[in-house]
Image (tube, rainbow, N blue to C red):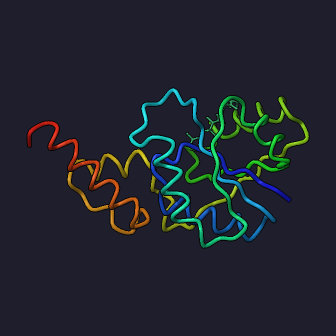
Amino acid sequence: MIAIYPGSFDPITNGHLDLIQRGSRMFDRLIVSILRNDAKQALFSVEERMEMLREVLHVYPNVDVDSFDGLLVDHASAQHATVLLRGIRAISDYEYELQMALMNRRLAPDIETVFMMASETYSFISSRMVKEVFSLGGSISGLVPPVVETRLSARLAKSKSHRGM
Ligand code: PNS
């Protein structure tokens, strides 16, 4: 069974990683797919995000990384995936996830959305908050893989030098 784990991954957090580990045990193949045509302003380019994902995920032989444009269900069909994997943290995630799952089911009735819960250790982490805390000088140790921390430091140093700080 092939599953797609779609998202922005800007950047990958330990919450995403926890879910990928669980998914890799559950499915024969898991494809982590980054949305390309995202309206949201991203910190990292799709290529940078793919590099970070590949670096962290190369230890899982049945996990691949790719990117997609357009509808998620079209990408899933093209990859012969029958499952969309999504993580749910708190109840606040539920409404958006329900809407998305039902819309995807309407578009492609043969593709099933499967929700999984990350470990409670990570249930409060979001990429947005990691970026905010880091940019304001707070510690994000243990919240993201080391490669992400290194890339965030480099990005922050670059933006400070651009601003002459
Ligand atoms: O990490 P995110 O930002 O919550 O991921 C959202 C994502 C990429 C899964 C969602 O925006 C998506 O699937 N976009 C592709 C467009 C699409 O298929 N839309 C219809 C279903 S809502």
Give residue 6's position: percent from left, percent from top.
65, 46
- Quarter where residue 65 is shown: bottom right
Residue 80: percent from left, percent from top: 85, 47
Q: Position of residue 17 (x, y in %)?
A: 55, 63
Hey, which quadrant is residue 139 in on the image? bottom left
Q: Is residue 89 above or below residue 142?
A: above
Farthest residue to the left: give it.
165
Q: Residue at x 83, y 46 (%)?
A: 112
Asked if residue 106 is positioned above or below residue 8 in the image, the reply reads above
Residue 138 placement, left or right of 108: left
Examine the rendered structure and indicate whether residue 138 appears above or below residue 112: below
The residue sitting at 48% across, 68% down in the picture is 121
Name the residue nearer the viewer: 146 or 124.
146
* Residue at left offset 79%, top offset 64%: 27
For the point 52% across and 60% down, the residue is 15
Quadrant where the image shows the C terminus: top left
Q: Is residue 53 left or right of residue 135?
A: right
